[in-house]
Amino acid sequence: MSLGRNLTFNIFRHDPQVPGDKPKMERYQLQEAPGMTVFIALNMIREQQDSSLQFDFVCRAGICGSCAMVVNGLPTLACRTLTSTYPKGEITLMPLPGFKLIGDLSVDTGKFMRELAERLKLWLHPLPTDKDMHHIEAPMEPEQAAKLYELDRCVECGVCVSACATKQMRDTFVGAVGLMKLARFELDPRDDRQDIDFYHVIGSQDGVFGCMTLLGCEDNCPKNLPHMQQIAYLRRKMALVTDVS
Ligand code: SF4
Ligand code: FES
């Protein structure tokens, strides 16, 4: 069997739980295997070289969003990133910026997503008729349902938050994931909220008018979601709201 090339991993290490621990980079060498992903490499490093290395994963298939990290400068999912993407064999791994660091490459995206959901009220606000258990919900047109399912593909990985310079400069900006999730409810005919209700949560510089169209969200989203299209859609809708009292 032919031997794979040698890979060098430079990995950010810091455990905020350990008093006095200082952030540093650590270097690991590994032999590449066919089809190896960054996630597989990290597992091998943890199993064979350093059991203290912290990083997150659940599904290993690009579905749970847990393994997002910055690979050679770009935020992405470790389980969907082949080491063969990097011809020099040098791979630098950093935790996603903009989230609370748990340790090494592990960040707390859950807290961020939960607070975002509470801030933007990211759940269906049913029509008065749909609150009646005996009322039969109206069927939805397939094209309409397809639009909603498209936006529901978000895996809450946090990549678009880390890739957004506006969000990194201004922490109060809701970010692309919040705007896209809100667009999903604005489009939903079963949601009772009117545009004025959405305006009160995103009709400001911290919301849809704060986006500087830098495209980091759309360029890096591992699910290829149409952030710019949805932000433009919401911006048009919010610009047309006249009575904001
Ligand atoms: S919109 Fe894309 S990048 Fe942002 S959290 Fe969802 S899946 Fe991740
Ligand atoms: S481990 Fe689930 S998305 Fe990578």
Image: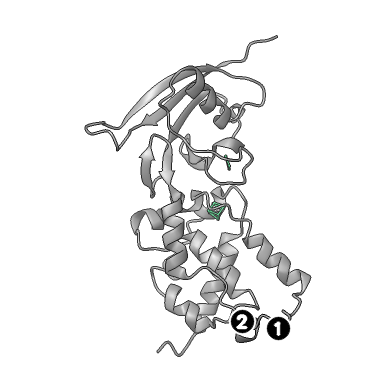
Point out the residue furthest to the left here: 20
Is any atom of residue 106 visible in this view? yes
In the rendering, at what x and y percent does residue 245 appear?
Answer: 40, 89
Of the residues shown, which amino acid type is indicated by label 2? Lys
Q: Residue at x 54, y 73 (%)?
A: 234
Q: Which residue is mark 2?
A: 131
Q: Is residue 182 above or below residue 193?
A: above
In the rendering, at what x and y percent does residue 81 appear?
Answer: 59, 35
Q: Which residue is mark 1?
A: 135
Q: Report crowding for label 1: few under 14, some 14 to 19, many 20 or more residues within 10 A (C-alpha).
A: few
Of the residues shown, which amino acid type is indicated by label 1? His
Figure quadrant of residue 207: bottom left
Q: Any atom of ligand 1 within 8 Å of the CB at mark 1? A: no
Q: Is residue 146 left or right of residue 104?
A: right
Point out the residue furthest to the front here: 134
185, 127: nearer the viewer: 127
Q: Report crowding for label 2: few under 14, some 14 to 19, many 20 or more residues within 10 A (C-alpha).
A: few
119, 6: nearer the viewer: 119
Q: Are marks 2 and 1 in contact (CB under 8 Å)?
A: yes
Q: Is residue 46 above or below residue 119?
A: above
Q: Residue at x 50, y 60 (%)?
A: 176
Is any atom of residue 164 visible in this view? no
**How far is mark 2 from mark 1, CA to CA?**
8 Å
Q: Is residue 47 left or right of residue 184?
A: left
**The N terminus, quarter of image:** top right
